[in-house]
Image (cartoon, rainbow, N blue to C red):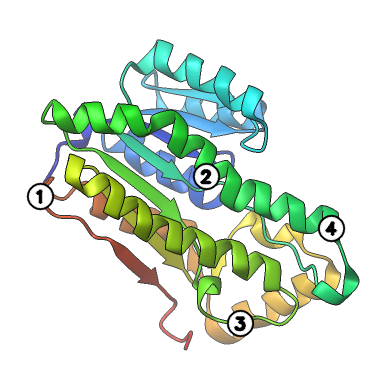
Amino acid sequence: MTDLQIRNAVVTGAASGIGAAIATQLAEAGAAVALVARRQDRLDDLAGKLGPRTFGVGLDVTSQDSVDAGVARIHERLGTVDLVVNAAGVMLAAPVADGRLDDWTRMIDTNLTGVLRLVQAFTPDLIAAAAAGRTADLVNISSIGAHVVFPGYAVYGATKAALTHLSASLRADLSPYDVRVTNLEPGLTDTELATHLDSSGQDLIASMNEQIGALHAEDIADVVTFAVSRRRELNLRQIIALPTRQA
């Protein structure tokens, strides 16, 4: 196992849901963690609970200026980052026939381009950390929606399919530098993500939760913590985490 007490981590989407659960588990395992999201107040509240080795960085992954400013703060506080978790994401019911360009753009900018902004910012850190003999991890939180078709969610599924493919390609690029890349695809998980949906979408999720039984954000955090704590020679490249009853 890799000692997480010597890791410097960045977790996006850390204001709630899966991102907050991952940040919490990493911090509780001893890592220094930069909590990244738009809602600074929530980040500060979580950091206050997790201790002095955690801190909130309010930034918007859809804005390059915001990312640049936030990354500068992270480097000032942590130095070289060796663990990056891209957990920020948005899921909107935006049927193609409705022509909701704003919703499509929001999902693409957050779920795909936002990840690329963080990858661009921290790839030099990951390579440098690995070159120094440290464990270096890039973890992307995709979705089972990358493979399974849900009517009305074509653009969301497309962003997650792109993220899954991007993760595989990034591993091809980064593995020669001993940087590990893990793509994790959760199935039905009870998080704040469902609140982004309209009333019919929320009713659908509630029905699925009742019939299937959703995972908890902490379940996904368990998987991430396990993956990044393996010895540096082992890379869990692709993980699908589903509720037992989800086909």
> Which disc, if any, is residue 149?
3
Q: Distance between the residues labelled 1 and 2?
A: 25 Å
Tag 1: residue type?
Glu
Whole-Å distance between the Cαs marked 3 and 1?
35 Å
Q: Mark 4 points at which residue?
A: 101
Secondary structure under the numbered disc 4 in the rendered image: helix
Contact check, label 1 and label 4, Cβ < 8 Å: no
**Labels 1 and 4: the sequence-earlier one:** 4
Residue drawn 31% across and 27% down? 125
Foreground disc of the pair 3, 4: 4
In the image, residue 155 above or below residue 28: below
Q: Could you tell me residue 194's position as x and y percent? A: 69, 63
Mark 2 lies on a secondary structure that is helix
| Residue neighbourhood size for the residue with mark 2, other residues' Cα within 10 Å, grouped as few (<14), some (14–19), many (≥20) | many
Three-letter code, disc 4: Leu
Question: Residue 125 or 46: which is nearer the viewer?
Answer: 125
In the rendered view, tell whether residue 68 sits above or below residue 158: above
Residue holding disc 2: 115
Q: Earlier in the sequence, mark 1 or mark 2?
A: 2
> Which residue occupies the extreme top position in the image?
76
Q: Which residue is drawn at 50% across and 46% down?
A: 19
- Name which residue lies at 80% across and 56% down: 103
Q: Earlier in the sequence, mark 3 or mark 4?
A: 4
Q: Which of marks 3 and 1 is nearer the N terminus?
A: 3
At a point 49% along the width and 58% down the height, the residue shown is 163
Percent coordinates x, y for residue 231 in the rendering: 11, 47
Q: Do the residues labelled 1 and 2 touch (CB within 8 Å)?
A: no
Please state which amino acid type lies under the numbered disc 3. Answer: Val
